[in-house]
Image (cartoon, rainbow, N blue to C red):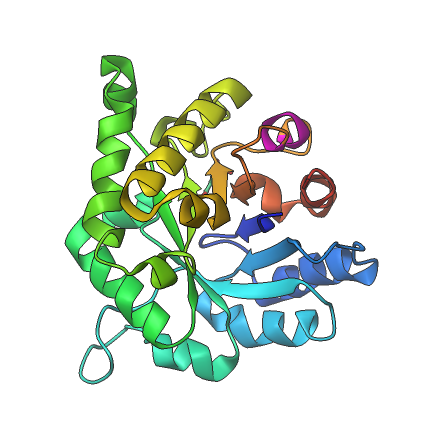
């Protein structure tokens, strides 16, 4: 079975004390996960080492950064390189979150560079894509998201693309409490898998995990994750609440 992933995106939230408390709450009684089920904590940069220490010894629990530079190293004040993340033992990096695209002007081209450098340093990109409300209302969401994939990922080889996790996050559902229905999520995920299959073949497409993100909560995760092309979720708000995120982990297939 494809990897099923519950990924917590803490964004720019929590003090170090609160971060430690949340991780302690979730890891005191870690879930018994099957080999294909994984939990990833995408924490702010200052807490990466803390999170890495906390998850060590817990099988199938991993740490992610929320971004990395498209540059290798050098005079880029304020940036964090993929190599630095690798040196901390970080395994995943979220790339192309809609908040990065919107507030930090990250383009599909820059994201292609970030994907490359992440793979160079053995980080697994969690590549985010998703359409804004006006595109959904115009009914052109499929082609919009397809372009995001093509421009940032389709230069990769078949071997490389299987190392990517895709997160479909309709922007109108992020942090709004307005979740896509399970059927809307399935429809887009099936479309993305077809686009991947057209480019790389069915076997490759079937191996790639596609997460759904957008107001996933303990109460709706099971319904959304039950869909055949939904392989877990990238979770913002609800990942800051231990009980809610624990329920989301339980909802993994
Ligand atoms: C996210 O930040 O990736 C996200 C999906 O946020 P939320 O779950 O709060 O909608």
The residue most toward the right is 29
Q: Which residues are magenta?
A: 221-225
Q: Is residue 158 at least partly visible in the picture?
A: yes
Q: Is residue 34 magenta?
A: no
Residue at 71% in and 48% down: 242
For image coordinates 51% across by 26% down, the residue present is 177
Residue closer to the observer: 69 or 159: 159
Q: Position of residue 194 (x, y in %)?
A: 36, 34
* Residue 39 vertical placement versus 239 (above, below): below
In the figure, residue 249 lies in which quadrant?
Answer: top right
- Residue 159 percent location from the top left of the image: 37, 62
Q: Is residue 34 left or right of residue 160?
A: right
Note whether 245 is above or below 63 in the view shown: above
Which quadrant does the C terminus fall into? top right
Residue 107 seen in this snapshot: no
Residue drawn 62% across and 61% down?
19
Residue 12 at x, y percent in the picture: 45, 55
Q: Position of residue 70 (x, y in %)?
A: 23, 68
């Amino acid at each position: 079975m494809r990897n099923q992933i519950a990924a917590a995106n803490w964004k720019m939230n929590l003090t170090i004390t609160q971060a430690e408390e949340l991780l302690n709450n979730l890891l005191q009684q870690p879930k018994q996960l099957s080999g294909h089920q994984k939990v990833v904590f995408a924490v702010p940069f200052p807490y990466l080492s803390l999170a890495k220490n906390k998850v060590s010894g817990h099988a199938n629990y991993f740490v992610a950064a929320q971004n990395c530079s498209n540059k290798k190293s050098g005079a880029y004040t304020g940036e964090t390189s993929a190599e630095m993340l690798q040196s901390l033992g970080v395994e995943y990096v979220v790339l192309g979150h809609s908040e990065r695209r919107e507030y930090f002007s990250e383009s599909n081209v820059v994201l292609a560079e970030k994907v490359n450098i992440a793979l160079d340093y053995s980080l697994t990109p969690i590549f985010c894509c998703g359409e804004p409300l006006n595109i959904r209302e115009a009914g052109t969401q499929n082609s919009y998201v397809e372009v995001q994939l093509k421009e940032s990922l389709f230069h990769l080889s078949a071997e490389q693309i299987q190392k990517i996790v895709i997160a479909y996050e309709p922007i109108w559902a992020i942090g709004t409490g307005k979740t896509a229905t399970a059927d809307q999520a399935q429809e887009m995920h099936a479309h993305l898998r077809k686009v991947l299959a057209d480019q790389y073949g069915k076997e490759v497409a079937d191996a790639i995990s596609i997460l759904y993100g957008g107001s996933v909560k303990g109460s709706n995760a099971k319904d959304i994750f039950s869909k055949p092309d939904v392989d877990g979720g990238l979770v913002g708000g609800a990942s800051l609440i231990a009980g809610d995120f624990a329920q989301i982990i339980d909802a993994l297939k």
